[in-house]
Amino acid sequence: MGHGGKSNEKVVFVGDSRVRKGNGFITPPDYTSYPGKSEAFIPNFLLKEWMVGVVVLVGFLVLTISEPAPLGFPANPTASVIPMPDWYFLFLYQYLKYPYASGDFIVLGTLGVPGVAFGGLLLAPFLDRGKERRFYRRPIASAIMLLSLVSIVYLTNFAWTHYKHELAKTGIKPEEERRIEKAREAREKGLPAPSNAVQTKEVAIVDKDDAGMESFKKATCISCHAADLKGASGPSLRGVGDKHDKAAILTIIKEGKKGPDGNMPPMYDTAKGAGLSDQDIDHLAEWLSKQKAEAK
């Protein structure tokens, strides 16, 4: 830049003052430069997260203590049932029905495929480390996720639908539904609902020394109902006289019984083959009709 308009004056260039001189890389200040606005992750932030977690956990514990767990109906091992897992395991339950996941391939079905699936889920954050967060820009991860969801929904729905068809086909009604219906009927009649508590008072055998007891053992009834009448693979016969009279018991012996409480084949020919006469079978039915909760 020239000064004073003199041509012989030395020209000195000082540059454009509007361009700032660069200072290179500037190290950002640490969190102490922003009091109250930022903090160290360890231990400050992490400690706060732990404290919040403790408060939430204590809240759950208070709820579980103050509100007892709802108990369902007591199990009845003598009832005919179709075993089913909880709803969140229905897809695995259905998957294990397929030939390639059961039988000779049971190890593959129980450990192989589920292990790969859940192992891949655990390793997903380490395998897929792309910066893209839009699902349509991540075709592989999105396709696997959608395929997994569709498979789980399909297998769960198929398992539940098949279960309902099996109930309708076999005529079995879940015991919980039967008891709910009994409670509804009692409520409509103005009677107290049946108790769900397990019977604690044991029903005794009536006339244990009667000849009917020997006929009961000889007719191989003990294989299903046990020698003490408490039931083995079949239902208990203690108190059976409160449900059936002599004629009904004779009909069951001769024709069998089918129903939600269990299936019993005709046992008349078996009893005759064991050496019982018609008089012995008649007396056996009479003795069983005397088996009541409170003998009169």
Image (tube, helix red, strand yellow):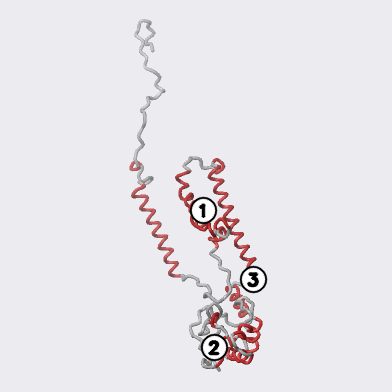
* Quadrant of the frame with the C terminus: bottom right
Viewer-proximal residue, 167 or 1? Answer: 167
84 shown above or below 245:
above
For label 3, the residue is: 170
Task: Judge from the rendering whether residue 251 lies leftward or rightward of residue 46; answer left or right.
Answer: right
For label 2, the residue is: 293
Q: Position of residue 75 (x, y in %)?
A: 52, 74
Picture residue at 38% right of the left edge, 13% below the top: 1
Near mark 2 (Cα within 10 A), the count class, few <14, some 14-19 or many ≥20, is some
Look at discs 2 and 3 and give the one toward the viewer. Answer: 3
State the CA–CA distance, disc 2 to disc 1: 53 Å
State the CA–CA distance, disc 1 to disc 3: 33 Å
For label 1, the residue is: 113
Q: How many marks?
A: 3
Name the residue type under label 3.
Thr
First in sequence, mark 2 or 3: give its number: 3
Task: Judge from the rendering whether residue 198 lies leftward or rightward of residue 35; answer left or right.
Answer: right
Look at discs 2 and 1 and give the one toward the viewer. Answer: 1
Q: Position of residue 186 (x, y in %)?
A: 61, 80
State the CA–CA distance, disc 2 to disc 3: 31 Å
First in sequence, mark 2 or 1: give its number: 1
Give me the disc on residue 55: none
Q: Position of residue 93 (x, y in %)?
A: 55, 61
Name the residue type under label 2.
Ala
Task: Judge from the rendering whether residue 236 lies leftward or rightward of residue 34; answer left or right.
Answer: right
Name the residue type under label 1.
Val
